[in-house]
Amino acid sequence: MAQPDFSTHSSQARFIRALSFLEGTVAMKNLQEATERICELKGSLIALDALLPSLLEALPPATHDILVRSFEAHAEAARTVILNTPISDHVLAAFERDIARTRAVLAGTEPPQGNLHPRQAVEAILNRPGIRGGYLV
């Protein structure tokens, strides 16, 4: 294979431009892959956000207090690990936001007092914190 001729300044400049272009193409490909992965993770998170309230509502009312205490203990343990680990502020902020959202969901799934009309039950679900206009936010 022939070696490139770098004897002139213009040859060197062309080679450097070509190399820069190739590096940019690789960087763009990596950025595209990262963006696609982030979108996949967002979709997975939304699916879990839909599952969590359903699971909580399916639990027997007697287990609600146990679940809340267990959640608080696990959240505090996770917070301790996060705070003692070199981790991004974005991760910590997202963790705290989701802990607050989960607390709101837990508060919204407390055993109801008396029987609700089905329409009231649906309205209660749609007005739950974290849901706006019937969509998770």
Image (cartoon, grey):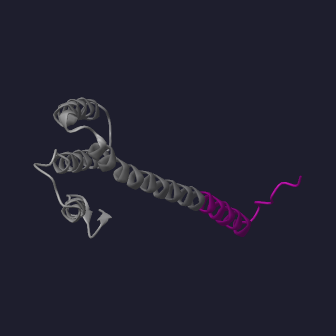
114 in the magenta segment:
no
Q: Position of residue 128 (x, y in %)?
A: 20, 58
Q: Which quadrant would residue 85 be assigned to in this image?
A: top left
Residue at 65 percent across and 66 percent down: it is: 17
- Which residue shows up at 14% across the image and 49% down it? 112
Q: Is residue 8 magenta?
A: yes
Residue 65 vs residue 87, the one in the foreground: 65
Occupied quadrant, residue 121 = bottom left
88 over 8 or under it: above or below:
above
Image quadrant holding the C terminus, namely bottom left
In this rendering, position of residue 45 left or right of residue 84: right
Q: Specify start and end residues of the magenta stretch as a single range.
A: 1-26
Q: Is residue 40 above or below residue 96?
A: below
Viewer-proximal residue among 3 and 126: 126
Q: Which percent across, then down, holds residue 41?
A: 45, 52
Is 25 above or below relative to 76? below
| SS majority, magenta | helix
